[in-house]
Amino acid sequence: MEEKIHRPMVLRLARYLRVLQKLKSLGFVKVFSNNLGDAIGATPAVVRKDFSVIGIAGNKRGGYVIDALIERLVEVLGKNEVERVVVVGCGRIGSALLNYREFPREGIRVVAGFDTNEDRLDPDAEIPVLPLSELPGFAEEHGIEVAVLAVPDPVATSVFELLIDAGVRGVLNFTSVELKCGAACAEDGCTEECTVHNVNIGLEIENLFYLIRLKRDAAVPEPVQ
Amino acid sequence: MEEKIHRPMVLRLARYLRVLQKLKSLGFVKVFSNNLGDAIGATPAVVRKDFSVIGIAGNKRGGYVIDALIERLVEVLGKNEVERVVVVGCGRIGSALLNYREFPREGIRVVAGFDTNEDRLDPDAEIPVLPLSELPGFAEEHGIEVAVLAVPDPVATSVFELLIDAGVRGVLNFTSVELKCGAACAEDGCTEECTVHNVNIGLEIENLFYLIRLKRDAAVPEPVQ
DNA sequence: TAGATTGTTAATCGATTAACAATC
DNA sequence: TAGATTGTTAATCGATTAACAATC
């Protein structure tokens, strides 16, 4: 009876929500599993299954009511208030993320940046950039749970430990050091203490080249190795 | 007999390779499935299975020879020459990627950036920033197959089409527009024409918050919904 | 009614895990 | 030999796909 909400499904739910909000803003009221599927690149059956799992019913002939979907998705995803994060490391990538235009639109607010380089500090800016040493106090005071990590590779691990000690429970890791904390670490990077998502840019590019090569080789008569 | 090399496995292979290269530079000669597993967060059995699939044998008692592993991995991953990419859109994120320190270390070279904003152009820089209009010619001349896309959301789709027309076969997409080309589009974003990897920063952060909430709720006695 | 869409169950596919035999 | 590690097969788990009954 009670089906599990697994990771690929959560990601889809978040995507549905985005599409639905756009549809709503366009004045739409109802939507078919068909259309939603197209929008996020899934089959209609998957969409219906997902909705069924989170307990949303459509009308056999008239599809799903967008408002009801949005309401339930927001509830399931727990996305009812602005999500506050800090950016740690304000070099090129860090400062780009500090000012990332899409964040406000997606209900994410960067409340501060942190760095050890004095030249980058700017405590009075709208989004202040503070010395890394102030992070623990700041995190506690503001109840920060999630950080974006964009420091140089060599200090990644030590800054990561600092974050965990400061009570951060989730890290979006832009360094190319594969971070893992404490105990057993699942493929996803989840432990009891801290959840890490690694955005490994180099690995992604490498993988693109691999897939391209694979396709090319598949096109050639000779069956691969 | 012939086992398939699937996506999660390819990603692991790339990680093995990195670790092995580090081990080698430290003077190591042999390695156990055990150690490699720890390093990339997999079980020893997975490591052995992976190596078995790509046709590498270890010594029952002495583990695997690092040099042989590296050689074979490089071969399988096709990573024997520098991988050349362009960065399209040289705003904050784009220009951060243009100068991304890790790329050279990982065998990736950004050969040019492209933008429509005149102020950002810099044709004589070491990594030149050229007008977007020159991209098709440039891509053909230099045989560019992979692009990093970091343009503003509203123009993402049209620039993406331009890339495909220019012969680009792989795109690392930093916009929050979910790109898909032509025909059937798998979850991964693969089509016959062009492979897209979406780096959806907002979605990742959202997912972090979701997982953190989930853990907290799981810790509380009351079983979730 | 006929047609289209939902919703659920069973079948299939994909990948990991477990178990253990082989052997250095 | 005893111990440790590889390598392979079978079992299990997880998620998607297919099929179809229900019904507006």
Image (cartoon, coloured by chain):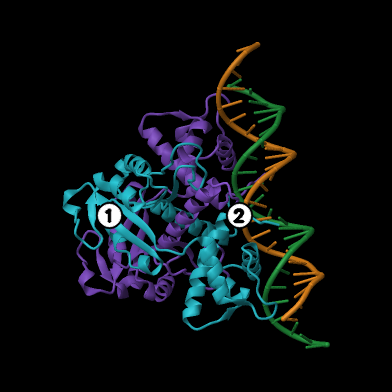
Chain colours: A purple, B cyan, C orange, D green
Residue underneath mark 2: B223
Residue B40 marker: none
Q: Earlier in the sequence, mark 1 or mark 2?
A: 1
* Residue A95 vs residue B62, the one in the foreground: B62
Residue underneath mark 1: B113
- For the point 22% across and 46% down, which residue is it? B116
> From the image, which quarter does the C terminus of chain A lie in?
bottom right
Could you say where residue A76 lies in the image, as x and y percent from the top left? Answer: 51, 47
Q: Is residue B204 left or right of residue B113?
A: right
Tell me which corner region of the image, top left, top right, bottom left or bottom right, holds residue D17: top right
> From the image, which quarter does the N terminus of chain A lie in?
top right
Q: Label 1: chain? A: B
Q: Label 2: chain? A: B
Could you say where residue A69 lies in the image, as x and y percent from the top left? Answer: 48, 37
User: Which amino acid type corresponds to the residue marked 2 in the rendered image?
Assistant: Pro
- For the point 53% across and 71% down, which residue is it? B70
**Badge 1: residue crowd in 10 Å (few <14, some 14–19, many ≥20):** many
User: Which amino acid type corresponds to the residue marked 1 in the rendered image?
Assistant: Gly
Is residue A75 something that shows in the picture? no
Could you say where residue A7 lies in the image, as x and y percent from the top left? Answer: 54, 52
> Eyeballing the image, is A86 above or below B195?
below
Q: Is residue D4 left or right of residue B19?
A: right
Tell me which corner region of the image, top left, top right, bottom left or bottom right, holds residue A57: top right
Marks 1 and 2 share the same chain: yes
Disc 2, SS:
loop
Disc 1, SS:
strand
> So how many labels did they put on this image?
2
Distance between the alpha carbons at the discs numbered 1 and 2: 52 Å
> Eyeballing the image, is A188 above or below A103?
below
